[in-house]
Image (cartoon, rainbow, N blue to C red):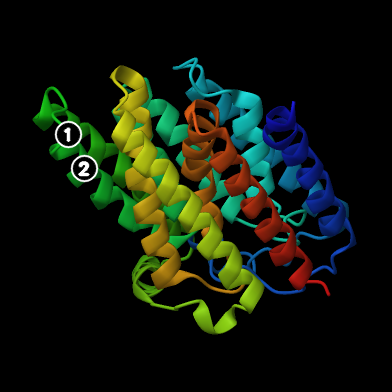
Amino acid sequence: MRNKIVQTVLPYCTLLLLVIIAIFAPVEKNSTGWIPLTGGLVDGCQWVSGILSVVLMVTGVGVILSGLYLVLLKTNTIPFGRCAALLLMLLFSNPHALHFNTIYLVLACIVWAKYCILERQIFVCYMLLSLASLFYAPAIWLVPAFLLMGAFSGMPERLRSFVKSLSGAFLPHIYVLVFRWIRFDDADVYLYHFAHEATAICTPFHQLGMPDYFFILCLLYVLYRAVSFIMAKNPMGMLAFMLKTDAVSLFLFFILFLLFSKSCMPVLSLLYFPGAVILAYYFKNCGKTSRTNVEMLLLMTALLLGSLSHIV
């Protein structure tokens, strides 16, 4: 009974508290920075305010959760309800999560790219990864990283898959470049800004407080325990492919966070999708319930402290 309360009831209670904190959190009046898709047309997301911001946020989260549901349909080992609760808890660790940010669009592209790769729709997968970089330029580094991972993963018809991947990756940017050239005749200026944003290193640690450090350390510790458990258990088949790609994604997204995080772009949120999947599998399948209960409580405490520290 106690294990059920910790693993099921407390996460939903924590999620409710985080949503309440987000409702009463002051609205931030900053921009999300230069967005490649709308660069020169709209000043970040400053045009989004009030109810529209919340509607766009709910829509973005709905798209993310629908993609997550379809991904988890590939296996019956990871419960969708628990995984969705963990993902929402992590997202709402940012008390300003109710207000729309383009990171939701980036995350939606990544979730649906994961579904497409599981469906062997390689062209669409890389098109979505490339589309993500039109909302957040440093995400372009995910394309070569996943290309290298695919080359060494034993994917059948490697040359054909490689050509499909490159075609999908180039397509969104070709359309944008042609539009900029025809409409504004500034394709070269756009490329310069994109290259600058994709390579401008901006480490986030001077912007963090002690509760943020505590939350990140707790999250990394629990994720380390979960990944170690997965490696020891060594699952097979589709589940193994899903968890291995999520583990690699965690590493790549954390590198993006270390190098390109800005105060107006909560880049740490990119870790939450693969992290929620890995943690949901770990909390369900690990036989040492007393240890996982302590880790769950530690993570929820860190979430609440980190969220409260931004508004107190």
> Which residue: 34% across, 49% down?
174
Q: Which residue sits at x=64%, y=30%?
A: 82
Above or below for 269 versus 212: above
Q: What amino acid is labelled 1 in the image?
A: Ser
Q: Which residue in the protein does label 1 denote? A: 153
Residue 125 at what x, y percent from top left? 36, 34
Residue visible at 38% across and 77% down? 200
Q: Which is nearer the eye, 151 or 167?
A: 151
Residue 162 % position (x, y): 17, 36
User: x and y percent of residue 155 in the render?
Assistant: 16, 27
- The label on residue 149 is 2
Q: Nearer the viewer, residue 108 or 128?
A: 108
Q: Are marks 1 and 2 in contact (CB under 8 Å)?
A: yes
Dot 2 crowding, Cα within 10 Å, few <14, some 14–19, many 20+ = some
Total number of numbered discs in the rendering: 2
69 or 32, which is in the foreground?
69
- Quadrant into which the C terminus falls: bottom right
Judged left or right of residue 52, residue 160 is left
Rendering coords of residue 36 (x, y %): 48, 62
| Disc 1: CA contacts within 10 A as few (<14), some (14-19) or many (>=20) | few
Nearest the eye: 247 or 144: 247
- Amino acid at the residue labelled 2: Met
The image quadrant where one finds the N terminus is top right
Q: Is residue 92 visible?
A: yes
Q: Residue furthest right?
A: 24
**Residue 220 badge:** none
Kindly report the distance in space between the C-alpha atoms of the residues bearing marks 1 and 2. 6 Å
Secondary structure beneath dot 2 equals helix
Residue 246 is at least partly visible in this image = no
